[in-house]
Structures are given as C-alpha cells and as structure tokens.
Amino acid sequence: MKAAAIYVRISSDPDGTRAGVSRQIDDCKAWAVRHGSQVAEIYEDNDVSAYRGKTRPAYRRMCEDLKLGTRDGVIVWHPDRLHRNVREIEDFIDLIEVTGAQIATVTGGAYDLTTTSGRGMIRMSGVFARMESEDKSRRIKRSAEQQAKDGRRPGGGTRGYGYNSGHTKIIRIEAAVIEEAAKRILAGENLRSICIDLDNRGIRTVTGAQWRTSTLKAILTSGRISGQRDYHGETVGAGNWPAIVTPATTIRLRGILNDPSRRTNRAPRSYPLTSLVCCGKCGAKMVARPKADKRRQYVCAKGPGFHGCGGMAVLAEPLEQLVSDAIIIRLDSPVLHRALAKPANDDGNADALLAQIGEDRDQLDDLAKMWSRKEISAREWSAAKQPILERIQAAERSVSSLTSSSALEGFVGDSEALRRQWADLPPARQRAIASVLLDRLVIHSAVRGRNTFDSDRIEPIWKV
C-alpha cells in the first residue's frame, strides 16, 4: 500500500484520554513499517459505537477518500474496529469491489474482498462481532437491573448533585438548593424562574455550568434525592444512600413536573392573574395584552384563536394590587385558616400510601421471579401485574394530592409576612397563591365617563 489509511475507533472514552485509540494507532503504524506500507492519513473515531449504527465522521470521510482513489488500502487493529454492523459491511464490500483497495488487520490478517472467501470471512467477523456486542449489552443491562433492585447506585459518570462522588454523603450546601427548589416548585413556581434565580445568585451545577430547566427537572424528579433507586424511569426500591427529600415529595414533584400540559421553557410569567380574570359580559377568560403605551392590561380577546367578545379590558397593575391586598386580608380569616389547615393525619396517610406502594412493588418482583422460574406463563404474568401497576399509579396520585395548599406555606394566619414578601415573590408564586384562594375574578363594565380605576368593577369569586 502506497497511500494507506489507518482507521481506529473506540466505543467509549468517558475520560477523554484516547488511551484505546492511541494503542491501536501504534500497533497499526508498526504493522505498516513491517510490511513496507506508507501511511497517508489516520482516521480516528473516538467514543463512537459501530454496533449502534451511530454516524462515524472519520469512517465516512475514509470511505469517500477510498472512492476518490486517494487511499489504496485500510489498516485496522481488528475487524470489529472497522464494523460491527452487518448492513454496513455489505456497503463496504461494494466499495472495495469497485476500488480494489486492500484491507489488512493487525490481529486478524488480510481480507481480500475481491474473492468469495474474503467476503465470507469479513461477513462472518461482522456476525460474530455483533453477537458479542449483543451478549455484552445483555449482561450489562441485567447487571444494571440487579443493581437497581438491590438499591445500589451505578458507578461512574458525573457525581449526582447534592452528594459526594461516592454518593455516600450529602453535600449540605447543594442539598439546601434541592430542598429550596422543591419547595418553590410545590408552591407554584416554574423551573425557568428558579434557574434564573440560581444563576443570578452565582449557584452553579456540578459541572460549574449555568442551570437549565432540563437539568433542574432531572434532579427534582429523580428518585435518588429521596433515597430511592430508579431503573428505566421508574422507582424500583429503596437505595443504600441518605435521602435529601421524602419519597412523598418526589411523587408530588413528578406529578407536577411530568404533567404533559406543563410547558417548562416559557419565560417567567409577568401577568400573575392570567387564566383567573374573566369577562363579565361573555364569561371568556381574559388574556394579557399591553396597551400602545406599553402599560400592562388584561383584555377579552376576539378573533382567530380567541373566544371572547372583545368588549372588556382592565389595567393589570391596579387590578393586581387590589387582589394582593384582598389576599393578604383574607389570610388572617379564621375560617380560611381552618379550611386550609393541614389535617393531622396527612403524614400518616402519606406513610400508609407509600407503604402500600412498596408492598405492590415487592409483589411485582415476586411475579417476575415466578415467570423467570416458569411457574407462570407470560400471559398470566401480564394479566397479574396490570392491576398492581394501576394500584401503584392510584396511590402515587393520592400522595401527590395531599397538602395541595403548599403555595400558602408560612403565610396562613400571618398576613404581615406575605405583605413584606409579596413584591419580591416571582409572578408564578403570586399566581399560585391567588389560585389557592380564588376561583376567578369577574371584570364588569366600566362606568361611562369614569377614567380612574374602579374597584367596584371587580368581583372576586373565592374558593375558600
């Protein structure tokens, strides 16, 4: 070979050290020297799997160079470094038949793809490589599943936020951030506003990066922060590490953050009464729409995509001030305090539901073991597990619905605390508080000739 291509690949290189490909390069260069071949270029795909069919940029570029005739052969360490995908091998055979390029391997000899036996050999190497990959994948998955059921955290990767690298101890400063974020989500804030606040305070992720909604959501919905082990997105049992929040909190967070109707990528709400303000003429919900002078207002919108009459509008700022004053006064109401007081047995209910969930998961494990021992058929296993899964889902919904007044935590019976903090609360939290107390705000027609804000137009319909 007068213009050989050395091709090297390694499937996984989490540390970025290139140790695997470096060894392949050294061995391939040594082979070229022994056989009098000249190396024109080294094509390197690092941390890329051939088995899963991922795009390999260097491999594709090498094939283009072979097609153009600028390379007359390929040197690889082992045939499985070149291919682990049977379909890909056929395309490669077609390419070699056209170009006549030579194929040599350091550990497996030469492959003459112009002959029937050579093509058969490389096809068989691909079949065995794929079989090996599938068997390895099966063993890894089975081991990961067993680790999950045993409550052990898988090793490797970036450490989980809130814990040390061994996941054996809680990092108190980070745990406090998790606890704060969880309370704010349960109180009605959205992920984006919390991320912005954390970034503004100089708080960073484990990698030192700024917060993203996807990162924060992954942390808050993971079972690990409540000392539980997840597998394929489902909690399978208790973990062997300390918890930062309770299992009930994890269930409630998942109920909120995994709601399909929830959008987490929108900007923080600047109209805290959106969806609560209704038109007194037609009953439609009024929408946020600033005036020409940029003053915020709620209007009854008419036209495509809207269902209003177009005949009602109210300035946002005085309306929101009026509502906040009314909420602060209402918080001191003894009737409201009794209505929102957490029942004494809420914790007991949550514990009982969580115990039931644990028992049902144990029963699922028992069913799986019975199926593996062929004591029951796959059809019997499927039929038996469905009602158990439904019980688990129903219990999780019940846990999530307990203590629905989290938005008012710390404020019921203490209106002064809310008065001091109201202006600094994010709009999403203000709206969550309003939603606990208000069913809707009905806006009636203005009195003709009255140009100032008229509080008599506003009719609050209270929930409690």
Image (tube, helix red, strand yellow):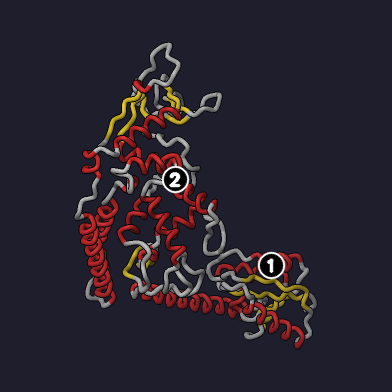
Please state, as top left, top right, bottom left or bottom right, where the C terminus lies in the image: top left
**Residue 379 visible in the shown view:** no
The residue that disc 2 covers is 263
Using the image, tell me which numbered label, if any, was put on residue 63: 1
| Nearer the observer, 173 or 250 | 173
Label 1 CA crowd tier, 10 Å (few <14, some 14–19, many 20+):
some
How much space separates mark 1 and mark 2, taking CA atoms? 44 Å
Q: Residue at x 41, y 46 (%)?
A: 189
Is 105 above or below relative to 91?
A: below
| Nearer the observer, 414 or 125 | 414
Q: Position of residue 207 (x, y in %)?
A: 55, 64
Is 363 above or below relative to 306?
A: below
Q: Mark 1 falls on what kind of element?
A: helix
Give the residue type that dot 2 points to: Arg
| Nearer the observer, 214 or 334 | 334
Q: Position of residue 51 (x, y in %)?
A: 54, 71
Q: Mark 2 falls on what kind of element?
A: loop
Q: Is residue 313 left or right of residue 111?
A: left
Label 2 CA crowd tier, 10 Å (few <14, some 14–19, many 20+):
few
| Nearer the observer, 361 or 44 | 361
Query: How many badges with numbers are in the image?
Result: 2
Q: Residue at x 24, y 47 (%)?
A: 341
Q: Please, which residue is most extreme toward the top here?
A: 449
